[in-house]
Amino acid sequence: MGTLIILAILALVVLGFNNPLWWFAGAALLYLHFRYGRTGQGTTGSSSPRGPSGPAGSSGSSARGDNDYRAYRQRRDQQARWERRYRRERPWMTRQKRN
């Protein structure tokens, strides 16, 4: 898929010699490719190298699923901490909601 994107960018650059608008289209495609098209390559923000992906022939989707679940758990735990802190700091607000 990446090869097709690169070929499309090159074609837009070649077309851009007659019309510079094609260069802008190529630059936009290049930006979108690097911003959204490269899945699994530094999009999570972690710089730790991945270990072996399990048995030979595994797709590696379980590692991404594990990272997604880990991120979900961190968001859930952070939300729970915020809610506990809010209840602790504002006990009168929680009492009014119950009645």
Image (cartoon, rainbow, N blue to C red):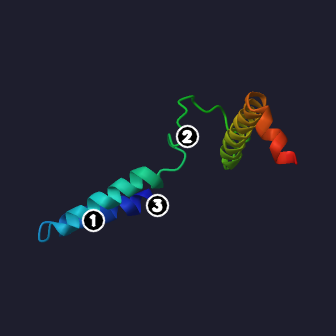
Residue 51 in the image: above or below residue 69:
above
- For label 1, the residue is 25
| Front position in the image: 33 or 75 | 75
Q: Which residue is drawn at 71% across and 38% down?
A: 79
Disc 2 to disc 1, C-alpha distance? 27 Å
Q: Residue 26: image x %, image y %? A: 27, 62
Q: Residue furthest right?
A: 99
Give the residue pinned by disc 2.
44
Amino acid type, callout 3: Met
- CA distance for labels 3 and 2: 21 Å
Checking the image for residue 73, the label placed there is none
Q: Is residue 94 left or right of residue 64?
A: right
**Dot 1, crowdedness within 10 Å: few (<14), some or many (≥20)?**
some
Callout 1 amino acid? Ala
- Residue 42 position within the rendered picture, expressed as x and y whole percent measured from the top left: 50, 40
- 58 horizontally vs 17: left or right: right
- For the residue pair 63 and 21, the one nearer the viewer reads as 21
> Which numbered disc, 3 or 2, marks the residue that appears first in the sequence?
3
Residue that badge 3 annotates: 1
Q: Label 3: how many residues lie within 10 Å, few (<14), some (14-19) or many (20+)?
A: few
> For residue 48, which quarter of the picture?
top right
Relative height, residue 48 to residue 54 (above, below): above
